[in-house]
Image (tube, rainbow, N blue to C red):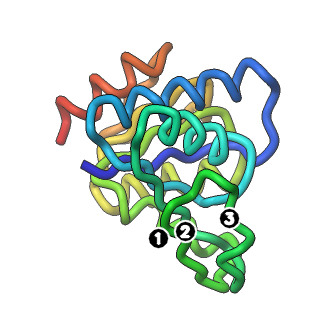
Amino acid sequence: MRVSVVGGSTVPAPVETIAEDLGRLLAQRGHTVVCGGLGGVMEAACRGAKDAGGTTIGVLPGEDRDEANPYVDVAVATGLGHARNALVAMNGDAVIAVDGGGGTLSEIGYASVFDRPTAGIRTQQVGSLDGFEPCDSPEAAVAFVEDAV
């Protein structure tokens, strides 16, 4: 399946490691990583996925496909800025959020609107949002979305 990985564009080293491990695990289990195509969590997840031989898709905010991080296989330029967050969430069969701020929160919201099961690792607290599961590791997050789809 396709799993959208969303999160902060600038993150501390421990969060980057979590995102890279997540991308690697997703690829090892045969899933395609969809993300916003830029840095931080997005780049780390793509790097992990590529390290494991996986495929990555970056849905970019700008008009230039060359703005994608170097680990994106398929870059989709949208020219939509943060409005592209809806497309990131919609193009995954599930969503996993790692860290992040307001943009990540919007992607979690879109995931709910599009009925995508969503796991969160060190991310926004969204209370009783249907389909959202806080997780403490990439393994728990992947297990949750695999079971939910």
Q: Residue at x 28, y 53 (%)?
A: 93
Q: CA distance from mark 1 to mark 2?
A: 7 Å
Q: Residue 96 placed where, x, y %?
A: 45, 39
Q: Residue 100 placed where, x, y %?
A: 69, 40
Amino acid on which disc 3 is placed: Ala
Label of residue 68 in the image: 3
Q: Residue at x 28, y 23 (%)?
A: 143
Q: Are marks 1 and 2 in contact (CB under 8 Å)?
A: yes
Q: Secondary structure at mark 3?
A: loop
Label of residue 87 in the image: 1
Label of residue 59 in the image: 2
Amino acid on which disc 1 is placed: Leu
**Figure label count:** 3
Horizontal side of residue 132 vs 39, given as left or right: left
Amino acid on which disc 2 is placed: Val
Label of residue 129 in the image: none
Q: CA distance from mark 1 to mark 3?
A: 16 Å
Q: Residue 92 placed where, x, y %?
A: 35, 56
Query: Which image quarter is the C terminus in?
Result: top left
Closer to the chain start, of discs 1 and 3, is: 3
Q: Residue at x 63, y 71 (%)?
A: 60
Q: Residues within 10 Å of mark 2 (few under 14, many from 20)?
A: many
